Amino acid sequence: MSLTPLIDVVFILLVFFMLASSFQSWRSIAMEPPVERGGGGDGSPAVLVRLLPGGGLDLNGRRVDEATLRQRLTGYAERPEPPRVLIEPRPGVSLQRAVGVIDLVEAAGLKRTRLLRAEGGS
């Protein structure tokens, strides 16, 4: 009895499982679920960070660069009662960019983050 067909089957299964496997390490981001704009806050102070298309950032209505945003968020984190951070990605902003800003907020020491649904978004 020849073992060649059995070796072929085992090789095909090996290739299949190698291609079907994922070697990425997945991590989750702890956040409150997205909400519609307006109302519904818990009354605590909040900071609004808008992510603009093209990589721009807007903090409470003023354009800032990433270094200034990091500095101001660190200042907010040092307050006795740190504010919530509301992140609003505008249409055309990639998910990767939003996750990068969420990481920046957490690195500054602010833990209460909420993702807002962009106006006109679905």
Image (cartoon, rainbow, N blue to C red):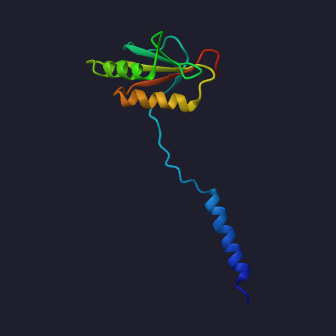
Task: Give me the residue at 47% from left, 43% from top.
Answer: 27
Count of marks overlaid on the render? 0
Q: Position of residue 11 (x, y in %)?
A: 67, 72
Give how far across and how far down residue 37 sits, in percent.
54, 14
Q: Quadrant of residue 84?
A: top left
Q: Position of residue 34 (x, y in %)?
A: 53, 24
Q: Residue at x 66, y 68 (%)?
A: 13
Q: Nearer the viewer, residue 48 or 101?
A: 101
99 left or right of 105 in image: right
Classify 89 as above or below 16. above
Q: Residue furthest left?
A: 80
- State the image coordinates of residue 75 (x, y, percent, origin top left): 31, 19
Q: Which quarter of the figure has residue 52?
A: top right
Identity of the residue drawn at 42% across and 29% down: 104
| 105 on left or right of 18 | left
Q: Nearer the viewer, residue 83 or 99?
A: 99
Taking the spot 48% from the left edge, 9% from the top edge, the residue there is 61
Q: Is residue 106 above or below residue 2?
A: above
Question: Which residue is the extreme one toward the top?
Answer: 61
Left or right: 77 with respect to 69? left
Q: Give the quarter of the figure containing the C terminus.
A: top right
**Quadrant where the N terminus lies?**
bottom right
Q: Residue furthest bottom?
A: 1
